[in-house]
Image (tube, rainbow, N blue to C red):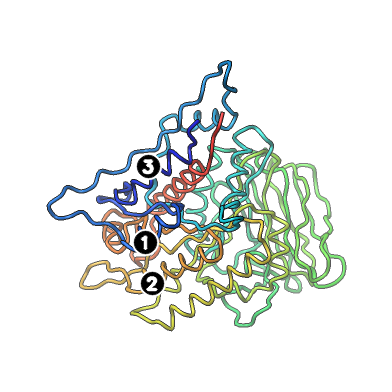
Amino acid sequence: MKSVRTAIATACIAGATSAVPNPFGEGPLLDPWPTLPPALLAQAEDAGPASPPADEPAPVAAQPVALPPAPTESADERPPSPLALALGAMFPDGVPAPAALMESSCSVTALERCVRPPLARTFAGLDAVVTGESRRVRIAWFGDSLVMGDLLTGGVRDSLQARFGDAGHGFLFVGTPGNRAGARGIRTRFSDEWDYTTVVHTVSRGQTLGIGGVAFEVPAGTAPTLWVATEDPAALTRVGVLALPERGARSFDVRDANGRREIAVETEPNVGGATFFDVASEGGVSLSGFSSATRWHGVSLENDRPGVIVDNIGLVSAEVSDMLKVDQASWSAEVDALDPDLLVFQYGANAAWEGTSTAAAARLRQHSSDWLSRVRQDHPDRDCLVIGMLTRGDWVDGRATVRDSVPDVVAVQRETALAAGCAFWSAFDAAGGVEGLERWRRDGLIGGDLSHPTRSGYEALAAAIDDALLYAWVSSQAVEP
């Protein structure tokens, strides 16, 4: 039986010289399929993006990829696999081509054959969910202010959970690190009685700031609290508290529908980790009584249902260079505690310098390489995805103009991601590249700072990422009867 991989690769090979539809506005986006055979991919890269001759019509946009028909049972054939049936039910009209494709190199090879594509663990998890296995797929999404507001991550979360199931909201800072993090779909109340240190506002390395790059501490004479609630109590049945005790036994109090109780922190002194406990969340869950001499980092809001979690671990003004300040051991310990399948890194807007600078590009390349090397060293079995920056512009003679450095930033992000064995997706290309900024402004998708999307822009960007992820997932299958 013809595989989905074969069907989609065939369509995308044709797409190397034809157009991929661009939902953000008029005009096609051109992009070679990133998993072409090396020789063919090299030819496409050498040739550069194709442009139609002036005397020829524009290329016809690629059509949605139809799934191969499920085979019928006969004396000579097995019945369709559960995965084939599930995919057919999810995408009866095929899989639409995304605005920009997920790009990848092979993270593990054997005998010149790719044996572990960069998103293999994530896609295997989605396979398990749709075929009825009790499986959770977790996506830990790190980034700057475009992530912290939870409009982008929340949009992707809503879409994936609608398809695969709601396994929980995921990560939430235990307090407010200057700018309040968004928390789409849940209700929260924070006290402002914390002292906190963020990775953005410290210059020293080796800070035990936890997975989110922020450490909260209890000032003398205060009693910080956190309250959370979900519309559906079944969506919140387990909470994990991430903390790093500096010495001795530490604890906090939890109040839920079953009353109030004390929970001991179960991590070793000066070793990050998470303490998980079950809750009855009717009416909300309140955490208080946080002990001193402990660096509190955040909470994880979960349940026992199969499905997807998308963590919002963004921080205003963060750059990838800031992540290198975080203590490697404690950060990795908390990543292990949450156990994500996919680590997403979305930075760049704060690194887009004015003008052109080879020195700035070299620094960004070094910082990105160092960070991704650390991630791959400590978490070789987890998938990773780098999302290239969206855009950054300036007003020139009343027109929104992309900074000259933006394509350079995206190129460095692509280069370092693929070199590290991570997947890469270009938000800049999906939004139309250099010409796309003015169109986004005209259509109300980008704010006046020419860097942050509007609410509508976040929705469009979340939909584009969701489309690209699902397209890559389906195209990775070899669905046999």
Determine the residue located farthest toward the front in the rendered image.
Answer: 111
Residue drawn where x is 12% and y is 52% of the image: 55
- Nearer the viewer's eye, disc 2 or disc 1? 1
Position of residue 354 measured from the top left corner of the image (x, y, whole percent): 36, 78
> Would you call the spot at circle 1 few (<14 residues within 10 Å), some (14-19), or many (20 or more)?
few
First in sequence: mark 3 vs mark 1: 3
Q: How far apart are marks 2 and 1 (CA)?
A: 17 Å
> To which residue does mark 3 refer?
11
Q: Residue at x 60, y 52 (%)?
A: 116
Are the residues tagged 2 and 1 within 8 Å (C-beta)?
no
Q: Residues within 10 Å of mark 3 (few under 14, many from 20)?
A: some
Instruction: Identify the amino acid type marked 3.
Output: Ala
User: Could you say which quadrant of the image residue 272 lies in?
Assistant: bottom right
Q: Name the residue under label 2.
A: 408
Would you say residue 342 is visible in this rendering?
A: yes
Nearest to N terminus: mark 2 or mark 1:
1
Left or right side of 404 for 468: right
The type of residue carrying mark 1 is Glu
Extreme residue toward the top, this view = 75
Residue drawn 65% across the image and 53% down it: 340
Local secondary structure at mark 1: helix
How packed mark 2 is, by other alpha carbons closer than 10 Å (few <14, some 14-19, many 20 or more), is some
Q: Provide the secondary structure element on which disc 2 rests.
A: helix
Q: Mark 1 points at which residue?
A: 45
